[in-house]
Image (tube, rainbow, N blue to C red):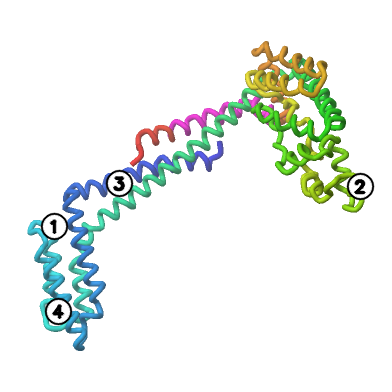
Amino acid sequence: MSSTIESATGDLATALADADAACREVQDRIDDYGEETVRAVADAYDRAADLLDRYDGQATGTGKENFKHFIQFQEKFDSLVEDLPEDLPERDAFEAANDRFDKRRLSESDFAAARDRLAAAGDIAGLLDERREAVAEYRETRREVGHALADVREEIAERERLVELGDADLDAPVEEIREPIEDYNEAVAEAFSSFKSSASARELLSFVAATEDYSLVSFRDPPETLEEYVETREVGTEPVSELLKYARYSNSKLDHYVEDPTALKRAVATNETYLERLDADPLQLEWPPRSAADLRWRVEELVSVVARFADDEVVADLRDVQSVVRDRERFEELRTVAEAEAELSDAEREKVASGAVEDELAELRAKRKRLEDAREEYPER
């Protein structure tokens, strides 16, 4: 494991502990006053600050309008202070600010001085914002820990996979499962090519549409305009190759073959790529193969689908694949060998053999535990 990842993991666990400590510290300060008291101070401070902001500049000067605003401001600020509870923390700060306005004329310096005198109350009012910020920081750090934990788990899974593949016996007779799969794939490709060449477009697209009932056979659904055209027009009884040939004719030449050249162009020419790419790929089996359980279900579906167009020999090839899947333990052993041959480089094999991967796994598991412990110790807020 790189020192960068190791350092990041440790830093995140420490950062989460620090974020938790910051949340607790600000909450302790709020608890010293009491939640409701802090909210009361914050409400009073906000109202006072709002008055100062609104009347600063309007209640100063010597004009008639200024004097009007001056009277309004004095009355409102004085009323605010008078209504405050006697035991409100820093009530004297509000009174000190109000005293600054007990004069016949105000200047901007009076407003500045009042703000200074309200600073102590502002510190208490600010505790709520401090808590919101601390909790937001805590949550963000905890999310980062979660992302790091997911990354470490993925790294562990990758290393464990390397060990599994590195332990595979490359001399095992993997052809026991490869040959039946290759034989079937070749046979079904040939059978589907023959079916596509000889069947009518209507029959071919009807077959493709019918496979929608089989979740493990993933043909792309026929385009609606094309499907409707071959179902309702006489030319739909001809093979796909003929339809594609017609689609490349000019309208004047095509007029000799179909009743509505424009309709054929619209339905076939626009879907030429779909028809050309329609092949046996959704019917073939992957290599390396799926797990025994997955392959067994896929083969069962394929037997039903392939039997719709292919002869018994192709279905028999599928049955041969079923036979090798029945011995699940043996199949999985050979499947792992196949995956090792396909996925593992020489350098990766050497790394597994040297024990370096196991060393990395030990480090990664230690990091995973540290992150998991941090997530458990510091729950969501």
Q: Are marks 4 and 2 in contact (CB under 8 Å)?
A: no
Which numbered disc covers residue 256? 2
Real-space Cα separation, disc 3 to disc 4, in angstroms? 43 Å
- Near-viewer residue (93 or 251): 251
Counting residues from the start of the chain, the first of labels 4 and 2 encountered is 4
In the rendered view, would you say 219 is above or below 314?
below
The residue shown at (20%, 54%) is: 39
Image quarter where the C terminus lies is top left
Q: Amino acid at mark 3?
A: Cys
Residue range highlighted in magenta: 346-370
Query: Dividing the picture into quarters, in which one does residue 14 lie?
Result: top left
- Near-viewer residue (5 or 286): 286
Real-space Cα separation, disc 4 to disc 2, in angstroms? 98 Å
Which element is circle 3 on?
Answer: helix
Residue, disc 3: 23
Residue, disc 4: 71
Which element is circle 2 on?
Answer: loop
